[in-house]
Image (cartoon, rainbow, N blue to C red):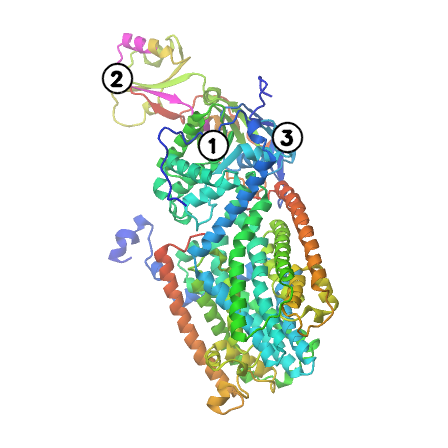
Amino acid sequence: MSAGRPAVPGRNAFVYRPTASPQAAAQWTRRQVVMTNLRTVAGRAYPRVTGLFREKSWVFFEILLPFLSTSAFVFVYRALQAPPQYIGFVVLGGAMTAFWLNVIWMMAQQLWWEKSQGNLELYFAAPMNIMAVLFGMAFGGFVMSSTRATAVLIISTAIYGVTFSIDQWALLIGVFFLTLAALYGLGMLLASLFLMWGREAWHLTQLLVEPVYFVSGLNFPIARLGVLGSVAISILPLAVGLDAMRQLAFAGAAYPIGTPSPLIEAAILVVMVVVFLVLSRWALAMLERLARKEGRLSVRWQ
Amino acid sequence: MSGSSEPLAIDVRGIRRVYKVKPKPVVALDGVDLAVEPGEFFGLLGPNGAGKTTLIKILTTLLLPSEGEARIFGFDVQRQTRQIRRIMNMVAGGEQSGYGILTVREQLWMFSQFYGLPSRDGWNRVDELIDAVGLDEQRQQRVSTLSTGQRQKMNFARGLLNDPWIFFLDEPTLGLDVSAARSVRELVLAWKAAVPGRTILLTTHYMAEADELCDRIAIVDHGRILALGTPDELKRRVQRESVFRIELDRLEGGVGALRRLRGVVSATLAAGDQADGQAERQTVEVNLALVDDAALGEVVGALGGLGAQILALRKFEPSLEDVFVELVGRGFDDEPAHTGDEPRSDPDDREPLAPQTETTDSREREEEVVA
Amino acid sequence: MTATEHEGLGSPRWGGFDPARTRGRGWIDLRRTFAVATRLGWQMEANWTDPILFFIYSVAKPLASALILVVMLDVISGGAKPEYRAFVVVGSALWAFVLSGVSGLAWTILDDRERYRMLKYVYVSPSEFLAVLLGRGVARIGVGAVGAAITLVVGVVILGVPFDPARIDWPLLVPVLALGLAAVLAIGLMLASICLQTRQESWSYPEAAAGALFLVSGVVFPLAVLPGPVQALSLVTPMTWWVEGVRRALFPGGITAVGGPGALFTQLTGLAGPTPAQIVGALLVTGAVATLAAVVAFRTSDRRAKDRGLLDQTTGS
């Protein structure tokens, strides 16, 4: 990034790319639409990524402290003298928490937050698709989340002696990225819903922390939840992705039966990705129209 | 539609917008019709709560009208939002938007990406605009540390990133000091002048701003357009004659002598010249209403014939607020502002229009004439 | 009027300015500020209190936390250790209270600065800012207390936690609750001081901090499981003694988190578990230290915030 150049002599800054008419300027090619949305993703990710380097308190709060939280559950299993793979389950769950928290704190309620700051109007008045903005937020947040997840995984594995046994690397990596895709798809769907719910979005985000941890089996195999676990697997990306990753990362370890095989769970994730993305696109369009109808794109102390 | 084959820049027909709030719905716009030609600098002037911002939000595709339709260069604001967003931009006064952690340059670049500018082009364009708006010293400064005026200049630069065909300015000088406000107005005019055909819709409650900048103005109140025309046309509604105050050393024959002069509609002694118990005055001040400015020459000549020496001459021009008072029967500040949460008064309860009279509250424009 | 008051600001010409206005009324103002802030905090929290949202904060969240631990326990022991179930349910319920207190003050700062943009106005008012903060925090603690109570009730009624109201140790419970409240507010104040310096994304910091405290406070497992140095840290943490005291007072005869085989406390004192007097004493001392640290942290943060113009900044990415 250059430090910035002064104006070119003789060039009128108020004339950029004149077009023949407003009608010509309004008609974009498909390529222009796609490139604008891709550039929007990069543009919106930029403040997130830049912020990481400009305000570094997150290193302590987003890495060290989550490691300590994960450690608490490790010690619960140690106190119960649980088999060693359970330590691994908790560590993997603790790592994936980072992505879930990113989805609910940095995506789901972000549009509502943008409205409070006055940015939402500017986004909707611009020609890009709002989904591109959300993708940008997701991508920017992914940098912090993956750092957190990696740190928790590595530190915990080293300190608590977790042993992974992986036979199917490709499937494991595939499941991981599918889980992320499904998570962020769900985040987009929640973002559109939260846009309409206003201030309650803040409180509803709270509902998505511990209760989701519980039904997703963050610290224990989800098979133990019986029917509830089955329901969770079919609707919560965190639940199905985590279960699949545990089965793949600790292959050969004693694992409670009752959940689908990793391949089937990967297929479930694919369906989730498609469903969430389609639903979020529809929901964003519908809710934008509703927000425009009710005047909710501007702050009205909701 | 305009007379030519080109669609109007702004074509509003029967727009109505009702907000469903408690205790009772608020009618923010009540049947507005508007036609703005391409290349016009159009102003919406009215007090707080008149409906200006609501109209601009409808035109910038942020709000749907309850009834009616509106088009921007032929594109429907309800169904062709994408096309409109590609050719317009908006800047509002008092904006606090932006990401405090970014520098001015980065903030603007980010928005350039939203408008599809290639990355490198975006940086170049941002640098250009930063210089053009006079923020070169703040280029690498964080947005959270900008002053109000600097932030507004940054917002203005953001508004120009995509070279819009139509620029919506919603009270752009709100909260700015005199110098910053003047800067913004100069920027607006310079931008408009750079390419013919650029259209601006400005909303404001600053009369002087509307008077200075706009080709045509619509005066709005309670969601309706009360009057529409050029600033001069609007002022002539209030005062068709040219009104002067003349200070003379003496006046033989009193004001009656002046009334008989050709071109004089009326002549009255200024209020201060009535007996007021003060010490003897050596001069006479007279309010003169003439048919037009051209009649002044003859009056001045006649005064010389009467042996009177002109000590001072001032012209009274009505302000746009005088126009508003004339239309509505109250000033901009004479009634609490109606917000979206307050119920409005019933339009039928409004005071009737005051008859056209000379007004001594008119804004004065001093033109000293030395005899 | 005195001779001085005939001139200058005190004179009738100036409207009779009363210099006493600049002196304030000491404790009266402080008490009033605290009461108003508490009421404001409650109104803000109660603003959303319809059944669904009450359910979220007072039932779903704390109950889910407890159930996570109950299932973890059952996964390993198959329900064979009911005393452990009581241990984790009580600890988890109490932690909901701690979390609300710890996050309450921090979120007040972030709410007022970023969302409502009122922080600077509150700050420049004559009210003591610390009192405002504490008042707002107390309101959130009230919400957390409701959640804790509901979780305990569910634990007793549904999860089989043995409880006998006649056996409650009131002489232990009352001082522990009072001292614990002060300690929770102190920790919350420390976090609030940090949030005054950080940017918008620090919404998650309070929960992260509470999660870390969760590790060292003997909430859901005996401290004996932790390494020695970490146990030492636990023993100087006021929350350890608070959880131990409330647990012992409400459920006498249960498992102790502080003492036991392998516990540092037992090694140092030779006792199987702390006595009520030791619990109260330790809570008093550690709470006092935490309070002192919190006040110092807050004053430092306050000064730095004024120095850097952070009180009216809005951040965000």
Q: Is residue A219 visible?
A: yes
Q: Are marks 3 and 1 on the same chain?
A: yes
Badge 3: chain ID: B
- Residue stretch rendered in magenta on the structure: B299-321
x and y, in percent, of residue C119 in the image: 44, 56
* Element type where label 3 sits in the image: strand
The N terminus of chain C lies in quadrant = bottom left
- Mark 3 vs mark 1, foreground winner is 3
In the image, residue C154 lies in the stretch drawn in magenta: no
Q: CA distance from mark 2 to mark 3?
A: 56 Å
Q: Are marks 2 and 1 on the same chain?
A: yes
* Label ID, residue B69: 3
Residue at image coords 34%, 42%:
B137
* Element type where label 1 sits in the image: loop
Using residue A74 as the reference point, say whether residue A9 is left or right of it: left
User: Taking B149 as reference, is A189 above or below it?
Assistant: below
Q: Which residue is mark 2?
A: B370
x and y, in percent, of residue B38 in the image: 53, 24
* Label ID, residue A42: none
Mark 2 in CB contact with mark 1 (< 8 angstroms): no
